[in-house]
Image (spheres, grey):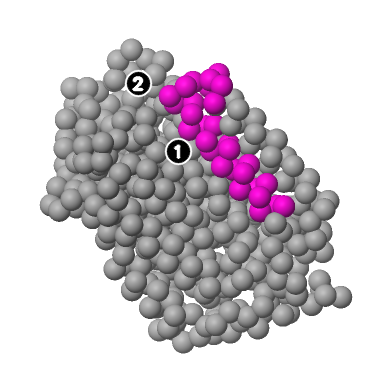
Amino acid sequence: MGHREAPAAASADTEAQPTAPAHRQSALLWLACAAQFMVVLDVSVVNVALPSIQAALGFDDAGLQWVVGSYALVFAGFLLLGGRLADLYGRRRMLLWGLLLFSSSSLVGGLATGPGLLIAMRAVQGLGAAVLAPATLTILTTTFAEGQVRTRALAIWTAVSSAGGAAGNLIGGVLTDALSWRWILLINVPIGAAAVLAAMRLLPADHARTTSGRLDAPGAVLATLGVTALVYGVNQAGPHGWSGTTTLSGLAVGIVTLAAFAVTEARYAAAPLMPPSLVRLRAIWAGNATMLLAGACFIPMWYFLSLYMQDVLHYGALATGIGFLPHTLVGIAAARLAPAVMRHTGSRSLIVLSALLGAAGFLWQSRIGSAGGYVDGLLGPAIVMSAGMGLLITPITTTVTSGVSDTEAGAASGLMNTTRQMGGAFGLAALVTLATTHDTPASSYRSVFVATAAVCTAVAVMACALPTPHRAEPAADARRGCPSR
């Protein structure tokens, strides 16, 4: 009886939001976007500041990689848990906790005087980000009703996410050159404080979201440990190779632990961290597989293009950041255009078309050479691949979040963010390995971009498994355990 009543109890604080005044919906949209911007920005903002950080705090080469790695590792590892926490304890509460963790660790990290403290604070930042990212998406999916209104909101959220990832190099370069590397962290403090005040004013108080309100502690431990170990093993493939002890150990622990997590959720958990009925939805499993491949395409792009501009074209930090402006602007424009295109093509067709457009851009980029310049070597491919990226993410996100009940919206959001980050980690590690098999920089970059084009093509193929909009399964069927149609 209690299980059947849970959805009705949960609706008390969620169903009212889609009928909220338009100005409040707009304010909530921009609050979610601001928080998401901080999360994505801090994935890449430190890249161009690493030499300054190394000189200021005395990092060795092995320790320096953890300025980036500690954030990415904790962020990926805790996303599933962060998403479910929003379902169990409320979006407002978890958004505020995420903002406080993120902002306070940014303050302490920006004032750090030694390597250990900075790495620790980057890890705490990753924990705050893992709470924030699913909460921002859950706010949108429970504030805006399914249809064109939600699609437009998700398109703006996607555009801001793309801008955060692309602008990280530019903002990091400007702050490092004009002020100090410390400001790439300290800038989060006033933004986070403003977001906390806005959240306290705009978001309604949380109510009980399940009859028990219990956290699936064994599932949370297994999921967090499994994803963290898997991402750690993948990241070790770069310095130690795929046959290295640390690589194989991380991968083995991750696979075994995630298998134990799947068994625990299916057979033993009374209130699963990741409900099996949710994962059985075709839109969820096929959509997340598509997002995994998409992350493997586009997240590594920033890494290799940044290396090319700095190592081959000999750009400084600021010039490299400026070099990403076309990627940023085209990606934002394409994301804003995605809802209008979806009305004519449908989400599945747009995923196929945009993935093939991205593949064409990467194939064009594979013609890059060491003697080329920015205009003849980067600008044209930037426009094509960024248009594909901007058009791609919105229809995938719309597909993955459609037909999901409010009580499971956080779990769905956490899963989608996890698959995207894991795709990026696997893609980057595999492409770095591929690049090391070539003798010259030009041949390395060519092989990397050809391989990325192939993965983009796989995104288009995988999208064919997605349901068409009129056949998407309702969440009620999922809760009854009905198979996907």
Image spot of residue 465 (x, y percent): 65, 45
Amino acid type at image mark 2: Ser
Image spot of residue 194 (x, y percent): 33, 73
Q: Quadrant of the N terminus?
A: bottom right
**Which residue appears at 69% of the width and 39% of the height?**
257
Q: Secondary structure at mark 1?
A: helix
Q: Quadrant of the C terminus?
A: bottom right
Q: Is residue 69 magenta?
A: no
Q: Which residue is mark 2?
A: 444
In front of the other: 353 or 143: 143
The span from disc 2 to disc 1 (Cα, nearest Å) is 16 Å
Residue 51, image quadrant: top left
Asked if the residues shown at circle 2 and circle 1 are in contact, with their CB atoms under 8 angstroms apart, the answer is no
**Which residue appears at 43% of the width and 66% of the height?**
99
Chief SS of the magenta region: helix
Whether residue 94 sits left or right of residue 389 in the image: it is right
**Which residue occupies the extreme bottom position in the image?**
21
| Numbered range of the magenta stretch | 218-246
Q: Which residue is mark 1?
A: 297
**Which residue appears at 53% of the width and 20% of the height?**
244
Q: Is residue 403 above or below residue 289?
A: below
